Amino acid sequence: MINNKLLYIFIIFWLICLTGCDERRLELIQDYSGLQLPGKYQILTNKTESEGFAGADFTVTIALKFDDNEFKKLVNNLEKIKKSTQYGQWIKVKNKYEFRSNPALLHSSGETVEMDIDKTENILKFQLIHI
């Protein structure tokens, strides 16, 4: 049987991370896509929403806006990296790049990743769903 005190500590730690780990959430973009973010951007959204027992099910949502020069760096970086990672692959679709999550990821870890880079708005959107 799990010690109630340890369970309480785990829940508090998890809630702190869900609400206060802004930089770690941004690192998820690189971890999943292989994409290195340029140094300057405006954070439009950076949040984690949780459901279930102790936040067992959660969604991480990030949206970043870049000025024209930084956006060019982002797209150049995307062109240089491999289009595929173990988590999925980048596909060019009209005026944006879409990251298609590897279906095996959902089966192995309960996670799926959605990402796109909109070339008309200079915005990168990222969403990690853990179920």
Image (cartoon, helix red, strand yellow):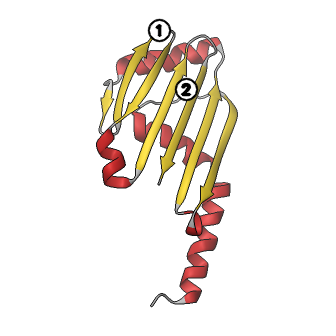
Res 66 visible: yes
Q: Looking at the picture, does residue 41 appear above or below residue 102?
A: above
Q: 10 Å neighbourhood of mark 1: few (<14), some, or many (≥20)?
A: few
Q: Residue under circle 1?
A: 94
Q: Nearer the viewer, residue 130 or 41?
A: 130
The amino acid beneath tag 1 is Lys
Residue ID at (41%, 39%): 32
Q: Earlier in the sequence, mark 2 or mark 1?
A: 2
- Residue 56 position within the rendered picture, expressed as x and y whole percent measured from the top left: 52, 63
Q: Looking at the picture, does residue 66 appear above or below residue 53?
A: above
Q: Residue under circle 2?
A: 38
Structural distance between the alpha carbons of marks 2 and 1 = 23 Å
Residue ID at (64%, 15%): 121
Q: Secondary structure at mark 1?
A: loop
Q: Is residue 17 left or right of residue 87?
A: right
Residue ID at (36%, 19%): 80
